[in-house]
Image (cartoon, rainbow, N blue to C red):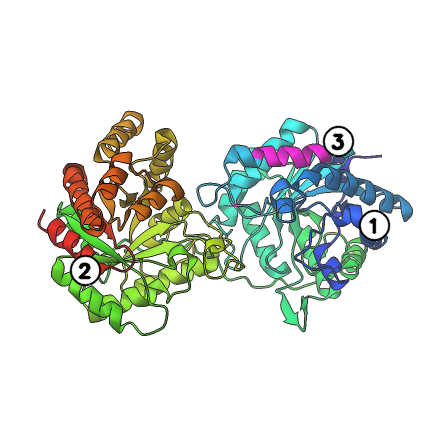
Amino acid sequence: MPNFLERLRERPLLADGAMGTLLNARGISFEDSFEHLNMLRPEFIADMHREYAAAGADIIETNTFGANRYRQAEHDLESMVSEFNHRGVEIARQAIRDVGSAALVAGSVGPLGAQLAPLGGVRPDEAYAAFLEQIGALNDAGVDLLILETFSDFNEIEQAIRAARKINPHLPIVAEMTFNRDQRTLYGLSPEAAAQKLLSLKPDVMGANCSTGPASLYGTLERMRDALPLEQRPLLSAMPNAGFPETRGSRTAYPANPRYFGEYARRFVAAGVRLVGGCCGTTPEHIAAMRQALDEGIGQPTLTRIAMVPHREVAPVAQREARVASGLAARLAEKQFVVTIEIEPPKGHDTRAVEHIARDLASAGATMLDIAEAPLARMRMGALALAHRVQDRVGIETVLHFPVRGRNLVRVQADLLAAHTLDVRNLFVTMGDPTSIGDYPQANDAHDIVPTGLIQLIKEKFNRGMDAAGSSIGEPCGFVVGCAMNLTPTDMDKEARLLHKKISSGADFAITQPVFDAGLARRFLEHYAGLYGPLPVPIIAGVLMLASLRHAEVMKNEVPGLYVPERILDRMSAVGNRTRTEGVAIALETVDALRSFIAGVYIIPTFGRFDFAARVVEAASKL
């Protein structure tokens, strides 16, 4: 029997449609592991494969889209990856035999569900290992080809293709990326750029799937096709959604009907696509209509060509001066010592007490105020609202703490635009505190982007007039971005490596964890310089006023990464009930010892005692 590539060169082939849509329509929640059904309800999965095979599909995809260690870890099933993939192939193969079809079995491989660095925390080698595990199982089970689908990150699909070639250089690969309505991937690749980058990886077939309906995907495929010289064009694939989803009661529905898909199957083939199929929202009825349309007249379009709006690459808006410049950036550039103090938002919506504190701190010599976002995951007013209120009513500039935890990529970008609109220009990007330690431990604190990735997004996209997908946002933003660092880490190599990564991503300054040992801080900077050269960004050193011996002991023993020398505990123990005064003295001595190699201090009040903090502000502002 001819293999996949031989068949594909003979005639266009038809793949099947959505699996998730059918499962959800038949009562399976999107929160469940679809792949676990290969073990729990194999006949249930086989029924859907049989329906697609009977509808005329030449390719049946295994129910293994998310059968990788990262997605299955969400269900505590990561140890079952091999079993899910093996069983998925067996079920598909048997279902094809049951209906007497000659269809081939394609191993479905989707994204890991966890972002790769720098935007996420998964290293390329870790992604490669995960794909090796999944694709190895699919290959061992005897798939006829692989379909790598719904990838928005080129770096991720690159690791998947590398893994596939390592496992079996002869196993055919269909590599499909997904594009939004603006015909860009989530990470900003145009169809032309995606086609050129995919070509370098030499998949057997390349194309696009998911996200949009047939009309938009048709335009995407045209652009991918036309971006490559004729002699280099690979075979193309197209597997669109059935339009954009809409909610009907408790179900998600898609508007594009089977007849429409049949018409577009012909259009795709006439445009040079050799493998067509369906993605989200498509059903066996859609595939049957495509089968009929293809059999009636392969390559004969029945629709008048739809007029497509000519594509024009939008160049990023030239960098111009932001409407309100950052005073912090100016101070750092002029080497003026910065004194900033952390303020927590109020529990309610009344900001008058915080405004009063802000005025007192400004009078004491603070050059700006750091506004914390949900410190210790406690419920508080949003930091952006308070930052704007303080700047507007008190007249002192703020540094907005911007944690990534609990924010998806859409919210991250919306909040960035809101901050810029409200004239908040200074951002301190952090991971944020886990909800498990806060007021609502059951709350979801998932995130789409890690601090390093957010720094890069701000500096390389927003500050150049683009969103994460590369689409124009109009005028460029003018954010100044800080990163977190530890001046006294226990593992200097690890901290130096992470800090270098943040700086390489574009960080403008660094704010440290509280420092209690200036000598160790100096040694860390020397260690960093030995690895990467002198630290190129200014440091704003964290200063915490210890309130008591017990407070010092908790800081030493229970706060990850915080180094408190024994001599500090000895001092707090020796002063009796004058511990707060001694805490201020320690803070002032630390600032004085750090002064020669820092650009400012970040004062962290203890238990709301801003009166003690003001003493450090007054002293530090005179340095």
Q: Of the residues under marks 2 and 3, which one precedes in the sequence?
A: 3
Pointer 1: what residue?
46
Q: Residues within 10 Å of mark 2 (few under 14, many from 20)?
A: few
Residue at (34, 37) in percent of width and height: 499
Name the secondary structure under disc 1.
Answer: helix
Q: CA distance from mark 1 to mark 2?
A: 70 Å
Residue at (37, 68) in percent of width and height: 347
Quarter holding the N terminus is: top right
The image position of residue 289, as x and y in percent, is: 78, 60
Q: CA distance from mark 3 to mark 1?
A: 20 Å
The front one of 65 and 580 is 580
Viewer-side label of 2, 3: 2
Q: Of the residues under marks 3 and 1, which one precedes in the sequence?
A: 1
Which three-letter amino acid code belongs to the residue tagged 2? Answer: Asp
Q: Is residue 7 magenta?
A: no
The image position of residue 40, as x and y in percent, is: 79, 49
Magenta stretch, main secondary structure, is: helix
Relative side of 488 to 279, left or right: left
Pointer 2: what residue?
611
Which three-letter amino acid code belongs to the residue tagged 1? Answer: Ala
Name the secondary structure under disc 2.
Answer: helix
The front one of 1 and 123 is 123
Which three-letter amino acid code belongs to the residue tagged 3? Answer: Asp
Pointer 3: what residue?
140
- Asked whether the beta carbons under mark 2 and mark 3 sit within 8 Å of each other, the answer is no
> Which range of residues does the magenta coloring cover?
128-137
Residue at (33, 55) in percent of width and height: 401
Relative side of 397 to 227, left or right: left
Q: Residues within 10 Å of mark 1 (few under 14, many from 20)?
A: many
Q: Residue furthest front?
A: 576
The image position of residue 349, as x and y in percent, is: 35, 73
